Amino acid sequence: MIHIDGSFGEGGGQVLRTALSLATLTGTPLTLDRIRAGRTKPGLAAQHLTGVRAAATLCNAKVYGDSLGSQFLEFIPQSPPQPGHYRFDVTTAGSVSLVLQTILLPLALTPGESRITLCGGTHVAFSPSFPYIQEVYLPAIARMGVCAEVTLVKWGWYPRGGGEIQLRVTGGQPLSGLNLQDRGKFQQVRGLAAVTELPSHIPQRMANRAENRLREAQMKVHIQTSRQKGIAPGAGLFLTADYRNSTAGFSALGKQGLPSDQVADRACDALLEFHHSGAAVDVYLADQLLLPAALATSETHYHAQAISLHLTTNAGVIEQFGLAKIEINPAHNLVSVFPQ
Ligand SMILES: Nc1ncnc2c1ncn2[C@@H]1O[C@H](COP(=O)(O)OP(=O)(O)OP(=O)(O)O)[C@@H](O)[C@H]1O
């Protein structure tokens, strides 16, 4: 039995998700208390609860404390993760990407094919947007051996949600480590300026503004515009910066009263800050790579844009499972993961 203090480090949802992934994969019984104690509304929110239920479904876990607002959870796996066809619905605009990240590695490391439908928020703040999962996260971990692809079926923005994605995983490949210390030469920025249920000048303005800003910075850039049907209005700009050895992702979401140009500026500012940092791995991927790296059979080394509290928190949770030793050099933003 492993006990995790949910208030550790950041004291947010990622402590729970990483612990769930590892308990599911290793069959280790887990208790967590003070879940999300660092947040203004602590305990399990809909997204976290869906993550708990999804992980429990994969390994037939006995679960206690799986209710909204619960700050305590007991999770006792009864079998190795079972590949298959599953559907999990967050029921709110809570992020489907975070549920995906909870179950992906257990499925990727178990022989067999899985098809998962995930419903909820697909493009929501403070979480990886669908394009980030598709263009940044999955390609990075594909290089480690994770064989998975995603399809967007319906857009789901905050606050309505109602989105849907499909995840397909071919499990059973061992993972290898990654060396991302040098991003290599800049190649291009690709982008998607998208709206649902809003007029076409909005994506056009976001795209024009971003293309102008990035060309001023001497970057090669191409941004597609997209106007789709949805259950609610929503807008966003999703950018990926490709370098020879790595890809980084940045996004900004529209909201009522926020001009399209400002949405574009937010995404461009984030991209340019990364570009000027010289790092190979953006601040988000830097915390998300730790889990696959810990499960690999060889070492991983990368140059992160910054060492976030998310990253150090995730490292602490992984180390409590005894799966890897993680070294962080804050002077140079270097992260090394040594699977044990
Ligand atoms: N713009 C973004 N692009 C990609 N990933 C992101 C972005 N914003 C946040 N993330 C990622 O989303 C995850 C959020 O973790 P966090 O613990 O904050 O989750 P949470 O479940 O939303 O928790 P809480 O509500 O407790 O904050 C982290 O892995 C972080 O890197």
Image (tube, rainbow, N blue to C red):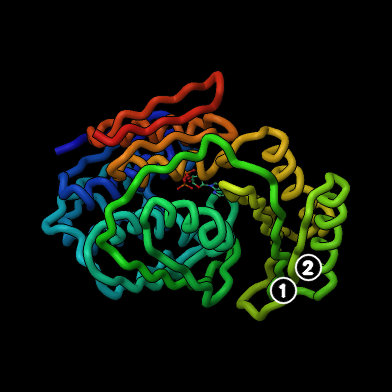
Q: Position of residue 192 (x, y in %)?
A: 70, 65
Picture layout, residue 264 above or below residue 116: above
Q: CA distance from mark 1 to mark 2?
A: 7 Å
Mark 1 touching mark 2, by CB under 8 A? yes
Q: Is residue 160 above or below residue 318?
A: below
Horizontal arrangement in the rendering, residue 241 relative to residue 285 (left or right): right
Name the spot of residue 255 as percent of width and height, x first: 72, 58
Q: Nearer the viewer, residue 304 or 311?
A: 304
Three-letter code for the amino acid on which mark 1 is drawn: Ser
Disc number for residue 207: none
Q: Is residue 207 left or right of residue 295?
A: right
Whole-percent x, y for residue 115 in the image: 34, 73
Mark 2 lies on a secondary structure that is helix
Is residue 85 in sight in this rendering?
A: yes
Question: Which residue is depicted at the point 35% across and 36% down?
Answer: 299
Q: Position of residue 313 (x, y in %)?
A: 41, 32
Decide if ligand 1 comes within 8 Å of the CB at mark 1: no
Disc 1 element: strand
Q: Is residue 227 above or below residue 299?
A: below
Residue at the limit of the structure toward the bottom, as seen here = 229
Which residue has dot 1 on it? 226
- Name the residue: 49% across, 57% down: 139
As drawn, the label of residue 203 is: 2
Q: Which one is nearer the viewer's eye here, 11 or 145?
A: 145
- Apparent side of residue 99 relative to residue 334 in the rendered image (left or right): left
Figure quadrant of residue 197: bottom right
Q: Residue at x 40, y 58 (%)?
A: 99
